[in-house]
Amino acid sequence: WFLMGWAGFRYRKKSDLLPRQVRYNLPIEVLYTVVPFVIIAVLFFYTTVSQNFVNELTDEDEGGADVNIGIVGFQWNWTFNYLDEGVGVTGQTTQPAVMVLPTDRTIRFTETSPDVIHAWWVPEFLFKRDVIPGRENTFEITIKKEGEYIGRCAEFCGEKHSAMNFVVRVVSPEEYDAYIDELQANPANAIGSGLGTGQVVKPGTEDNSADDEHGSDS
Ligand SMILES: [Cu+2]
């Protein structure tokens, strides 16, 4: 306020003489055209490089990813389908969906939504991807570290948006194969998730604070 008043007073009209005119200063105009352009070009370059890195998929000709997971986000929960194995789990309000994944295998996710936009988010993976109706979003990760990670819906999607939690349980490849076998042998257990009732950890109730390392790359 003081500076505004001071500028108004200091530079008030004192005579009918025009002050010095500074239009058409070519060097300055070139400067403030070129400098922002260079800044944007540099940012654009690094954005493209890291976007390509994050979105990179293994070549389909070379067999594609080791594991293919279909993520369906709907109002208001998640279905996780193990596409190659023909089994899937669906979360319920009282029993969040558990996604069991193996370490050291490339995992490709394909996301779809039958209703509105959701977002699959696992904070500890430092990764989040929108689930958009009418299109398939794909991404790939390889997880290095076993553990249990909490996931959430990160796009406000209606009344029970805050209930759209899920669990990502990362196990060794052998345990993963055993889990899939069990799921295939007993699809009734698939409802909910973690094989049989009572085994499911409710998001937000266990202590993950000891894990400060991030379990995924790419
Ligand atoms: Cu949602």
Image (cartoon, rainbow, N blue to C red):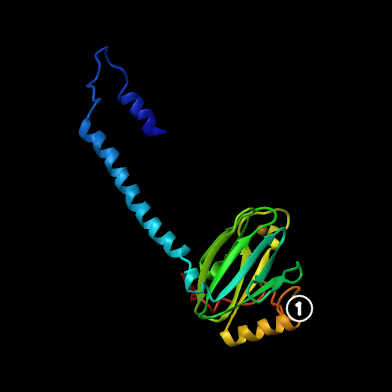
Q: 20 or 56, which is in the foreground?
A: 56
Residue 8 lies, in percent from the top left, at 35, 25
Could you tell me which residue is drawn at 42 percent across and 61 percent down? 52
120 sits to left or right of 106: right
103 sits to left or right of 179: left
What is the quadrant of residue 133 in the picture?
bottom right
Q: Tell me if residue 83 comes above or below residue 111 in the rendering.
A: below
Q: Tell me if residue 186 comes above or below residue 21 in the rendering.
A: below
Residue 126 lies, in percent from the top left, at 51, 67
Could you tell me which residue is drawn at 48 percent across and 67 percent down? 57
**Mark 1 vs ligand 1: CB under 8 Å?**
no
Q: Would you call the spot at circle 1 few (<14 residues within 10 Å), some (14-19), or many (20 or more)?
A: some
Could you tell me which residue is drawn at 52 percent across and 73 percent down? 65
Give the structural element (helix, strand or loop) at label 1. helix
Image quarter where the N terminus lies is top left
205 sits to left or right of 218: right
Residue 60 lies, in percent from the top left, at 50, 69
What is the quadrant of residue 202 in the picture?
bottom right
Q: Which residue lies furthest to the top in this view?
A: 16
- Residue 41 can be seen in this image: yes
Identify residue for label 1.
187
Q: Residue furthest front?
A: 61
Where ligand 1 lies, by quadrant? bottom right
Q: 19 or 28, which is in the foreground?
A: 28
Under mark 1, the amino acid is Pro
Q: 155 or 47, which is in the foreground?
A: 47
